[in-house]
Structures are given as structure tokens and as C-alpha cells.
Amino acid sequence: MTLPTDYPLTVAALYHFAPIAEPQAVRDALHALCEGEALCGTLLIAHEGVNGTLAGPGAGIAALVDAIRAMPGFAAIEVKYSGAHMPPFKRLKVKVKREIVTMGVPDIDPVHGQGAYVEPKDWNALIADPDTVVIDTRNSFEFAQGTFTGSVDPGTERFTQFPAWFDAQAEELRQSGKKIAMFCTGGIRCEKATAYVRAQGFDEVYHLRGGILKYLEQVPAEQSLFEGGCFVFDERVALGQGLELLDVERAVAKGGE
């Protein structure tokens, strides 16, 4: 997807798993770049990779993405772009963390152990199959904002609770013999969630490449099986089909508060 031109600000959601030998040095360099380009948002750096959502002028976002892609192992990083009329974040945070998405399970390999990717254009056929269990790996508030038709809500408040929830369902899922299809906002939680599920001995494990955001970007509204809005972690609240901004009051009402 190219940078949006019909908004004054560009928002980039990105992540990539690849080894980083010196996270602090990378953090310092990227923080300086973000400050110089007047970007706001959050960028996390860990030994396992980078993850973040940032906003700012299109040229500044492009400079940041180019800098990350120039890092060893990061040339293939995928970025989801959307737009904003007002700054969606109040400040800039660039941090070194233990994990770029916290599951709290050691020895999970999201690079080689993850489930099979399913492109957005093929997702509808997979989740419409009665032999597929569709699991939303996000928290219950996000689920209430919007989700795919027929998906399962694990009822979690944070991602660290997902492994325990899955462990409680594992025997029933194993006996059902069904395929497991998983999704999240931009794809990063599913990298670890599907790796965890495969580590428990499940073979037919799939996840939506690029997450809900990529699906909403690529799948025409008349074919969409996503109902409601996709909650995003900034002041825009939620995005709809085509990654268009939803009415904030309507989006919050859908959250079931």
C-alpha cells in the first residue's frame, strides 16, 4: 500500500521479527530520526525485532520506514498505512523492551514456528469452512468493537492470558479435528499465538497475513465478513472498510462500554 495522500498526516503500523544485536543503539538512532521528522506514536525495539505505530508527515514516515528497511534482516518489513486529520498520538515513545509483543512464554519462535499465512483474498473461504475454528487473539474490548463473523472471543484482558486460555481449550480442539484460523489487528500477536499453538502439537494452524487492517484495506466492502470497526490504539478509536475513519461515538458504542 502506498502512502495516503488525502490526509495531512500518515499513520504507519509496522512490525518485523528479526535479530537485533544491540537494541539500545538501534533505539537511539531511530528515536533521533523520529524526533527530527516530527513523528509521534510508539516504537518498540527488542532483540527479537521491532513493532510500532507512528504518525506524522508522509515524508517523515517514509524516512523512518526506509531507515528500518536498511537494517540487516528488515528489508521485507510490511507496513500498513492509513491517514489522520489530527495527530492520533500525544507524544513520541521509542523504547527497548524484552519482547515487542508481550506473551510471556519463553522459547516461542515467531520466525520459524508460526502458522501458515493466509492472504486477505483467501481468508473468507477459510473461515466459512465449517471445519475451521476461528479465534480472535485480541482482548474482549477489541472483540466488542468488531470482529469476523463466527469468531471465538477468548475473553482475555491482555495477551499474556492467551496461552492459559488456549491450554484450557486444547483437548476439545484436538478432539474436534478442526483447523485453527487466528487473527489480530495487524498480525503481530498471531505470529506468537500461532507459534504457541503449533508448539502444543497442532499442525493445521493458520493466520491472516497483515491482520484485520490488511483485510479491510484489500477486501471490497461487499465481500467483507468483518462486522463493526477495528479498534486501533490511538485517538482515532476505530477504522472501517478501506481503513476509513469511523465515527468516534459510533465506534465507542460498538465497544460495549
Image (tube, grey):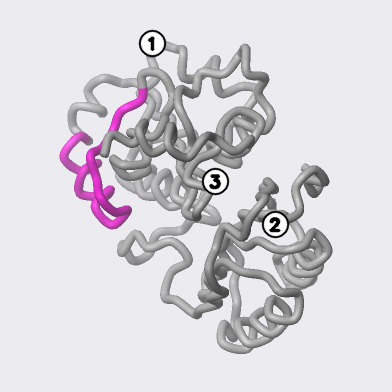
Question: Disc 2 marks which amino acid?
Answer: Ile
**Cα distance in 3D space between marks 1 and 3:** 25 Å
Vertical order, 242 against 56 (above or below) = above
Q: Nearer the viewer, mark 2 or mark 1?
A: 2
**Cα distance in 3D space between marks 2 and 1:** 33 Å
Residue 130's label in the rendered image is 1
* SS assignment at label 1: loop
Left or right: 186 in relation to 105:
right
- Report the front residue among 226 and 136: 226
**Cα distance in 3D space between marks 2 and 3:** 13 Å
Question: Disc 1 marks which amino acid?
Answer: Pro
Vertical order, 5 against 95 (above or below) = above
According to the image, label 3 marks what residue? Answer: 186
- Report the front residue among 118 and 152: 152
Looking at the rendering, the stretch of residues picked out in magenta corresponds to 151-169
Identify the residue at horizontal 69%, vertical 52% (top origin): 79
Left or right: 176 in relation to 94:
left
According to the image, label 2 marks what residue? Answer: 77
Residue 171: percent from the left, percent from the top?
18, 32
Identify the residue at horizontal 63%, vertical 87% (top origin): 28
Residue 147: percent from the left, percent from the top?
42, 29
Instruction: Looking at the image, tell me whether mark 2 or mark 3 is earlier in sequence order.
Output: 2
Residue 94: percent from the left, percent from the top?
55, 77
Identify the residue at horizontal 70%, vertical 67% (top origin): 73
